Amino acid sequence: QSALTQPASVSGSPGQSITISCTGSSSDVGTFNLVSWYQQSPGKVPKVLIHDVNQRPSGVSDRFSGSKSDNSASLTISGLQAEDEADYYCLAYAGSYWVFGGGTKLTVL
Amino acid sequence: QLQLQESGPGLVKPSETLSVTCNVSGGSLRDTNYYWGWIRQSPGKGLEWIGSVYYNGKTTYRPSLRSRVTISIDTSNNQFSLRLKSVTSADTAVYFCARRTVVGARIDFWGQGTMVTVSA
């Protein structure tokens, strides 16, 4: 049950858009629409941004959006802000357990 | 307002058993809309899902930990627990308890986490 594959780091300037990928397999991301995304700021607990691939919980900015294609899911952040600088994790259902991605550090330049 | 609070030993010796408990207030572990689980994060590393338990005691575990882990639930005292036996330094981490929704499958509440160090 290896971690889902995410880029170690991404960066962007304020106002730009970035996308973070989360690559799994046909056993997890490819089969189940149970992918969620979490933001973890330094010293904080993770916060859910997206669930069920592309659903945003109440209170989460519409700058955050999710999608999925085949065995990969993606999180897009539009209109980057300094406060978006954090670690981002995907989480997917793998049939009988759950697996996180390795995490992506977002730097806002 | 729901609150989850972990309590743990802080320090565990190699080969011994790690035990951490999550006390839940402001909500009921009998609520059938949620699973209750454990997630850990080694220093400077990513999140790792350990396992979860439902109100009726049904559990699911990370396959690589299944032989060493037990998660139990005590709905009378509104707490659930993690036991991890035969620990090594690789089990040193912050252990978070968390709530996951049945519908929508999102982890919507987290405890603050408790640091457990495995060292002689």
Image: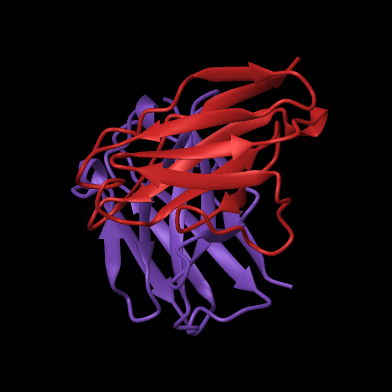
Q: Position of residue B95 (x, y in %)?
A: 51, 45
Q: Position of residue B73 (x, y in %)?
A: 41, 72
Q: Position of residue B85 (x, y in %)?
A: 29, 45
Foreground of the two, A94 or B78: A94
Q: Colour of chain A?
A: red
Residue at left offset 63%, top offset 61%: A57
Q: Quadrant of the N terminus of chain B?
A: bottom right
Foreground of the two, A42 or A7: A7
Q: Up-down: is A65 above or below B22?
A: above
Rendering quarter of residue A58: bottom right
Q: Quadrant of the C terminus of chain B?
A: top left
Q: Is residue B92 visible?
A: no
Q: Is residue B95 left or right of residue A16?
A: left
Residue at left offset 81%, top offset 27%: A82
Q: Colour of chain B?
A: purple
Applied colour scheme: by chain
Q: Is residue A27 left or right of residue A82?
A: left
Q: Is residue A47 visible?
A: yes
Q: Position of residue B56 (x, y in %)?
A: 34, 81
Q: Up-down: is B86 above or below A13?
A: below
Residue at left offset 53%, top offset 49%: B96
Q: Up-down: is A66 above or below B111?
A: above
Residue at left offset 65%, top offset 49%: B112
